[in-house]
Image (tube, rainbow, N blue to C red):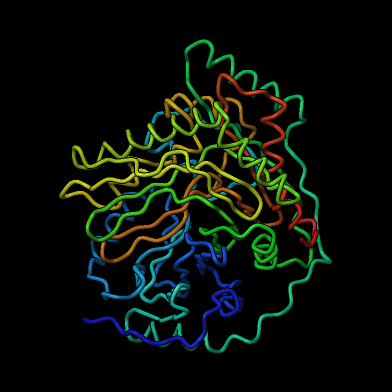
Amino acid sequence: MQPTVLDLPVTDPVAVFAPLADDPLAVLLDSAAGGDPRSHYSYIAADPVDILDADAPFAALAARLAARRRPAVAGLPPFQSGVAGWLSYDLNRQLERLPSPPPATPAFAAARLGEFNAVAAFDHRQGKAWVIGAHKAAHHLRDRLLAAPPLAPLEWNIGGTARPDLPRERYEADIAQVIAYIHAGDVFQVNLAQRFTAPWPQGLSPFSLYRRMRARAAGPFSAFISGRHGALASVSPERFVSLDAKGRVESRPIKGTRPRGGDAASDAALAAELVASVKDRAENLMILDLMRNDLSRVCALGSIAAPQRMALETYAAVHHLVSVVTGQLRPGLGAIDLLRASFPPGSVTGAPKVRAMEIIAELESAPRGPYCGAYGWFGDDGAMDLAVAIRVAARHDNTVVIHAGGGITADSDPRAEYDETLVKAAPLLAALAGEAP
């Protein structure tokens, strides 16, 4: 049956999503970086026909997508119906034999995914929007979006303070331990993260926190995903992996970070310092090679290329070095094969990947939960687009969790690496505290 396509006479996905933000499961995939060439499409999905939050979602997800398979409507944004939500980093133990990290609260689910028969799609380059999907579901979603009242002004007068699980001295000692593993020949690089937690500020809605994060550090792969026990808010700058309906694969790993400067001269100097950094370029190259290796498990021989290597990309709060890896999926394989071959993202694990994940489980203070997993969509036509779940604030019941980390190499300085985590966490911590930009 041909999908229904309805024009949507609004172009602000945040405004029309706001009334849906308290749903048991609603998804806003928000290309929030206005004017950024990487920000193209945003999507809203609500009223799922089913929710997949099984502890072992890969097989269930593959079966659901196979049963739903149908072509997309040409000429419209690529996600038109299918599955959307997030996958926990801790699903890595279903793909590799890894030790369990220390138990901690809150305990996040393994995944939170919805099966959606209609999607609102926003093309920011054209300034157009549509609702696409099954006839009844498309009309219902369009009616809900059109009924949204004007977006309330963003308030900053409620806040909370998140504190790190570990004192600085302990985290720097853990970095030193990673460096010792590297010098022993155990591993080349490990992405080590620290966790910040806070009681949820009474009177602050999760969607208001997302809007604050978006105001401070919008990313081209931002998202807000509501849930039964809380919500996930992210302003990620990083695509994990995408797959189009013709089997073309792209990954955009990020490694190398500097803060933005307070004026044009200092900003340019920090960017130049990053581009010239031997340590950061080596770190990026290792992850580029790791992603090529992961994709080679499912891509056609000779199809993998790196059309962009260690290029400077600038975001609202930071400069990054970004590479691009592409390939062509082998015939007979699909989105979940690609996901299983590459999950979790190499840029947030290390190299070699399995040993790096073992060290992460040994040294980090708690399971990562949604952080460093992935979120995004799986289309009914076989396409997929997932972001790396970084720059994340995840609420579970009455606790909010924020992580920040960085890649540790033989040349790392523990004090500088600790400071880099603070640079990455700063916009999220400020948003939680209610500090207006």
Residue 95 vertical position relative to residue 149 in the rendered view, above or below: above
Residue 105 vs residue 212, the one in the foreground = 212
**Can residue 227 be seen?**
no
Residue visible at 61% across and 50% down in the picture: 391
Residue visible at 71% across and 47% down in the picture: 265
Number of disc labels: 0
Q: Quadrant of the N terminus?
A: bottom left
Residue 313 in the image, given as x and y percentages of width and height: 53, 48
Residue visible at 76% across and 24% down in the picture: 169
Q: Toward which corner of the image does residue 327 lie, by quadrant? A: top left
Left or right, 410 with respect to 253, comes to: right
Residue 343 vertical position relative to residue 29 in the rendered view, above or below: above
Residue 26 vertical position relative to residue 234 in the rendered view, above or below: below
**Can residue 295 be seen?**
yes
Left or right, 309 with respect to 211, comes to: left
Residue 332 in the image, given as x and y percentages of width and height: 16, 50
